[in-house]
Image (spheres, rainbow, N blue to C red):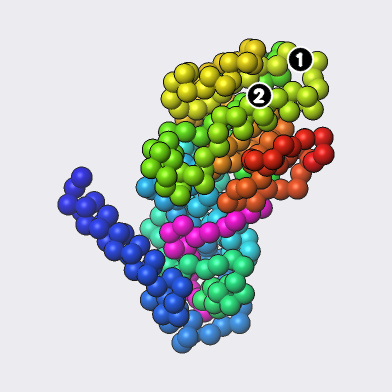
């Protein structure tokens, strides 16, 4: 790591600490220049030629980064602004997802178009006063060429609000020409995402993040059994289990015929197959939630999750601890 990268990382860390200490205090928005700008420059309209952006967190996984990107795309619409793209930390994800195709980037707006980048404070989308402040800040820049950039990890709960846009971008991406599936189209292909990896150690240490995200193997077995009973298909059923670890960690699944273990699979390949499955059984993970938003197949998801689900007929929500029957959903 270079000296510049080390200093940059330290600055981000200090900034994060300050935000965490002040976020729920009256002083918080006053830490931003944009807050004071809104006090001295008051306009009653929005310049719809200005842009809005949320930067994917470079230190997070791709599911988390996609949540950041989606928040920017959603709030650009809500505040009647244009959307500006920021790339994911790994360029391969940009190419694979195609989200930046036909979108102007923040860097291009600043270096070539004469736009100024300004930072917005975090806001609770359900807090009327905080949203009103953001609108006030945006209108105060109506006479300037500006790209509004969200503070890191700006929250947007119901990520399905841009689901149609995600589908259009993903299926229309140039990378789709190179997709190769190992599914047999003669089968009814069921993809099961069992989140393990990072949460195993957290669960063993009884850390809250590990416990919140954990679903036992028996949960997935129950869902698969119920899905067998409810969803009728004339095609032979093939099950693909995507996770991390060894086969011995998933002995509960040995009861299923035609089961293929896809353990420690390439993340791009995993994402693609989660999207393209006839049925996707998700975990408490943004990594399988995002493919569910893009998938055209049947989705079975844990009801308790930190993002919302659309009220579509292809989404079926199930409880973790209670006996459930899909036919009653």
The span picked out in magenta is 140-162
- As helix, strand or loop, the secondary structure at mark 2 comes to strand
Q: Which residue is mark 2?
A: 190
Q: In the displayed image of the protein, which residue is found farthest to the bottom?
A: 40
Residue at the image point whose x is 53% and y is 19% from the top = 251
Q: Badge 2 local density, few (<14 within 10 Å), some, or many (20+)?
A: many
Disc 2 from disc 1: Cα separation: 12 Å
Q: Residue at x 68, y 36 (%)?
A: 300
Vertical arrangement, residue 115 with respect to residue 62, above or below:
below
- Is 140 displayed left or right of 59 in the figure? right
The question of residue 157 being in magenta is answered with yes
**In the picture shown, does residue 226 fall above or below 109?**
above
Q: Which mark is residue 235?
A: 1
Q: Main secondary structure of the magenta part?
A: loop
User: Image quadrant for the C terminus?
Assistant: top right
Residue 266 visible (yes or no): no
* Place of residue 116 in the rendered image (x, y in percent of width and height, measured from the top left): 42, 67
Coordinates of residue 220 in the picture (x, y in percent)? 62, 30
- Above or below 243: residue 290: below
């Amino acid at each position: 790591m270079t000296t510049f990268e080390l200093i940059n990382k330290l600055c981000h860390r200090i900034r994060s600490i300050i935000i965490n200490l002040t976020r729920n205090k009256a002083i918080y928005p006053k830490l931003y220049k944009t807050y004071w700008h809104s006090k001295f420059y008051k306009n009653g309209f929005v310049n719809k030629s200005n842009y809005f952006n949320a930067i994917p967190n470079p230190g997070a996984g791709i599911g988390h980064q996609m949540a950041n990107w989606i928040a920017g795309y959603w709030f650009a619409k809500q505040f009647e602004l244009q959307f500006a793209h920021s790339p994911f930390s790994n360029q391969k994800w940009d190419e694979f997802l195609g989200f930046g195709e036909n979108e102007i980037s923040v860097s291009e707006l600043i270096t070539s178009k004469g736009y100024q980048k300004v930072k917005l404070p975090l806001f609770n989308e359900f807090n009327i006063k905080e949203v009103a402040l953001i609108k006030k800040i945006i209108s105060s820049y109506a006479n300037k060429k500006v790209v509004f950039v969200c503070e890191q990890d700006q929250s947007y709960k119901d990520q399905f609000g841009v689901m149609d846009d995600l589908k259009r971008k993903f299926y229309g991406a140039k990378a789709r020409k190179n997709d190769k599936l190992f599914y047999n189209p003669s089968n009814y292909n069921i993809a099961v995402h069992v989140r393990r990896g990072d949460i195993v150690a957290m669960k063993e240490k009884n850390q809250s993040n590990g416990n919140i995200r954990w679903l036992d193997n028996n949960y997935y077995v129950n869902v698969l059994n119920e899905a067998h009973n409810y969803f009728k298909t004339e095609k032979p059923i093939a099950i693909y289990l995507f996770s991390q670890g060894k086969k011995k960690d998933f002995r509960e699944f040995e009861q299923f015929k035609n089961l293929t273990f896809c353990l420690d699979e390439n993340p791009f390949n995993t994402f693609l197959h989660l999207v393209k499955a006839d049925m996707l059984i998700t975990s408490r993970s943004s990594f399988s939630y995002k493919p569910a938003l893009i998938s055209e197949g049947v989705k079975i998801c844990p009801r308790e999750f930190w993002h919302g689900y659309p009220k579509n007929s292809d989404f079926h929500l199930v409880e973790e601890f209670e006996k459930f029957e899909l036919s009653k959903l």
